Amino acid sequence: MRISQAQRRARLGTRHLLAGKAATPEEAAAAVVALHGTDPATVFLSAGARLTAPGPEPVERALYADRTLVRMTGMRRTVFVVPSELVPVVHHSSALAIARRERASVLKTFGEGGWDEARLKDVEASVLRLLAESGDATAAELGRLEPRLREQVRVAVGKPYEGVVSIGSRLLALMAMDGLLVRRARAGGTWVSGTHYWGLAPEMAELAAHEAQAELVTRWLAAFGPGTEADLKWWTGWTLKDVRRALSAAGAVAVELDEGTGYVLPGDGEETAVPEPWAALLPALDPTPMGWQARDWYLPPEHRAELFDRNGNVGPTVWWDGRVVGGWAQRPDGEIVWRLLEDAGGQAVAAIEAEAAGLAAWLGEVRVTPRFRTPWSGSCRAPEIVRTPCGRTPRRSSGRPGRSRPPGSWRRAPPPGGRGSAASARPR
């Protein structure tokens, strides 16, 4: 059975809720297994791109009030925002193995300062006791209550990235990986702030590692399938042996892709109806472009270095009908600007303008600067409009109505309520 690139793009738009939107952030997260949470703003922007009524309020409610979404370390030692029912699966399939490696690293880093396993365990017990007695607390508050958390050591001595780290900055995250702590409400600022409270983690279901891995692969295939072993190995951070065992346990069925053998769930070989053309502005580290290692079927290889770094991290992307066609950013004054990699046509430009205006409307006065941004997108934050990208020859627009401007021109989002705004966008 062969699945074409066009079919993969149809599946992407439909299953990732980009061609049709979700009612709740829980649905948006489940559609892509989990939202990337390394950058707090990514969680809200990724959810917003998939919601019929985007905005920070429903995401904050799910994270901090209802706790139906949980921020935790998971695959590839990355922080994700995970639907609460999936927490045991991510924990037992990925986080516990990462915690074992992290504990060895902490002991190696702080060993010369007198830290051993016994002392580490003693401080962990103290932190758990303090949180049980006093309730949730920030890392700074815990450091005042337990001074040993403030002990520091210099790392990477003699290297360009030499610095000083505290035991608390490593230990609290390690305790979360072990399932002892959980990240609670943010401690201040707006929703783009990364400061949060630590709290005691609730009890979770026990799962064998192989059972949890099989369930996670099942979820991934439902959202991202078809995909290859290499895609799944990259996304999970597991060994190839673990990937193959989990694919077998999930009953994965082999299919033919342009890049080789891929896999889908049993019974998932039927064609997906092609949705109406759709546009989206996805943030840096969004789970859709981060879902596969092989990306040629949705991003021309000649443009990959402009949007991805060597580690596979992606900057803010502009999508049209299942393909990446450009990048976007927010300027310091709040303006949303975007630039195309290629001439996508007038219909695409109108739809992208609508998405950009809708994004600007719900962001309001909040400013978002991704922690990861490609060099290609950096020039858009200058006060002036950049008409030609670095290293490219300017191209002239035809100026005729209904024709898009040439690739490389930065475009402003229309003002809220104006042409191409969310108010004039077609219903989703």
Image (cartoon, rainbow, N blue to C red):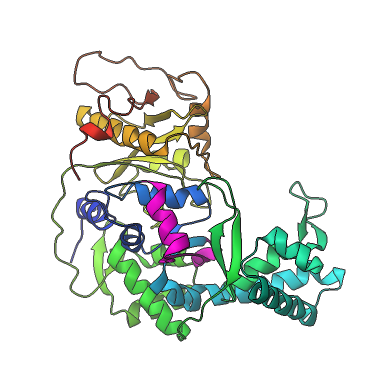
Looking at the rendered image, the quarter that the C terminus falls into is top left
Q: Residue, x 37% and y 52% (percent of image)?
A: 47
| Horizontal side, residue 168 vs residue 341: left or right | right
* Magenta-drawn stretch contains 50: no
Q: Residue, x 78% and y 52% (percent of image)?
A: 163
| Total marks placed | 0
When the figure is inspected, residue 86 is found, relative to residue 401, above or below; the finding is below
Looking at the rendered image, the quarter that the N terminus falls into is bottom left
Instruction: Decide which of 65, 299 is in the foreground and name it.
Output: 65
User: Is there any visible trace of residue 326 in the rendered image?
Assistant: no
Q: Quadrant of residue 178?
A: bottom right
Instruction: Decide which of 186, 324 is in the foreground and name it.
Output: 186
| Horizontal side, residue 87 vs residue 21: left or right | right
Q: Residue furthest front?
A: 134
When the figure is inspected, residue 205 is found, relative to residue 136, above or below; the finding is below
Q: Residue, x 35% and y 57% (percent of image)?
A: 25
Q: Quadrant of residue 294?
A: bottom left
Tell me where the magenta segment starts and ends, as one range: 55-78
How far across and down, in percent of the image, does residue 86 sit?
Answer: 40, 72
How far across and down, in percent of the image, does residue 175 sit?
Answer: 63, 73
Instruction: Decide which of 387, 367 is in the foreground and name it.
Output: 367
| Horizontal side, residue 186 vs residue 210: left or right | right
How far across and down, in percent of the image, does residue 366 sit?
Answer: 48, 37
